[in-house]
Amino acid sequence: MTTYELFYFPSCPFCQLVLSELPNVEPKVELKNIMENFDFRNELMAGGGKTQVPCLKISNGDDVKWMYESRDIVNYLHEQS
């Protein structure tokens, strides 16, 4: 089963673009605010190699992908709906 986690922070306009589309897509996406939880920031850095947001972590078992561009994230999530 594929799971989705969105690393973001509220004042980021690119994050807001992705967040505004989440109600319009079927996959449930867990939200991880890197400004409120430093562990989320560390997870993003360790896994994705940078702290750029928004970042969608796509996990399917041991296969993990990190997607960074807001338009790419929105398009991907719509394709999964």
Image (spheres, helix red, strand yellow):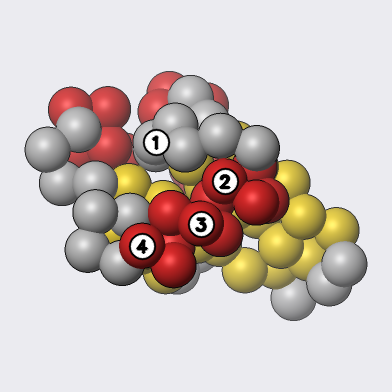
**In this rendering, is residue 47 above or below 12?**
below
Nearest the camera: 70 or 36? 36
Q: Position of residue 51 (x, y in %)?
A: 47, 38
Residue indicated by mark 3: 42
Callout in the foreground (4, 1): 4
Furthest toward the right, the residue is 62
Q: Is residue 24 left or right of residue 66?
A: left
Marks 4 and 3 in Cβ contact (< 8 Å): yes
Q: Position of residue 81 (x, y in %)?
A: 52, 54
Question: Is residue 19 in view from this perspective?
Answer: no
Callout 1: SS: loop
When asked about the image quadrant of residue 63, the answer is bottom right
Marks 3 and 2 in Cβ contact (< 8 Å): yes
Q: Residue at x 73, y 46 (%)?
A: 65
Callout in the foreground (1, 3): 3
Residue indicated by mark 2: 45
Q: Residue at x 33, y 55 (%)?
A: 34
Q: Residue at x 48, y 24 (%)?
A: 69
Nearest the camera: 46 or 71? 46
Q: Is residue 68 left or right of residue 61?
A: left
Give the distance between the C-alpha atoms of the residues marked 4 and 3, in whole angstroms: 6 Å
Q: Is residue 75 left or right of residue 34?
A: right
**In this rendering, is residue 17 above or below 2?**
above
